[in-house]
Image (tube, helix red, strand yellow):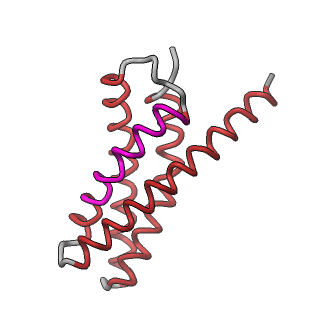
Amino acid sequence: MIINFVKTQFWKFALFSLVGLGAFLLDWLFFNLFYGLGLTFILSLSLGWIISMFFNFMINRNITFSARGFSIKKQAIRWILVYLIAFLFRSGLGKLVLFILGESPLTANIAFFAGVLIAIPISFIGSLLWAFKKN
């Protein structure tokens, strides 16, 4: 029973990661677009994140966690809270990296990647155990 649970969660995490890769690419593209246009690091990070999160929510809701049969409003509110917490950790770490390395297009991208690494486990665990939890 435990082995089946671990296998199931492994495949969910693998799919979650694949969906996350797509969202990450959208996020990174828009982050660099906005940052290249002269917006601040946090504003660029926020706008890229907002754009990619719509894609992320819909795919994870409908495919990864197969939670279509449940209230989208309740899921969306929980999901937004999970991702806001992950975003706070992500942006905090990003700002720390910029503080240490200084701000340039290269270090902004390093900060972007560092933040993503901390956000992935937070968002997966929050999505699995709360946002898309089946009652």
Please provide percent x and percent y for residue 28: 39, 66
User: Residue 73: image x %, image y %?
Assistant: 30, 24
Left or right: residue 34 versus residue 20 is left
* Vertical side of 110 occupied by 69: above or below: above
Figure quadrant of residue 64: top right
Question: What is the x, y in percent for residue 120?
Answer: 51, 52
Vertical placement of residue 96 versus 62, above or below = below
In-front residue for pair 43/59: 59
> Which residue occupies the foreground of this view, 86 or 99?
86
Task: Give, as a single range, the part of the protein colored magenta.
Answer: 47-63
Reply above or below: 79 against 135.
below
Position of 100 compared to 47: left or right? Answer: right
**Count of numbered badges drawn on the protein:** 0
The front one of 88 and 20 is 20
Q: Quadrant of residue 11?
A: top right
Asked whether 60 falls inside the magenta stretch, the response is: yes
Taking the image as shown, residue 88 lies to the left or right of residue 17, namely left
Quadrant for the N terminus in the image = top right
Residue sitting at x 40%, y 72%: 111
**Residue at (46, 53) in percent of width and height:** 119
The residue under the point 33% across, 77% down is 99
Magenta stretch holds residue 127? no
Give the residue displayed 39% in from the left and 60% down from the top.
Answer: 26
Residue at the far top in the pictured view: 135
Q: Percent position (x, y) of residue 112?
A: 40, 68
The quadrant holding residue 41 is bottom left
Please say if 29 is above or below 126: below
- What's the magenta bit mostly, secondary-structure-wise? helix
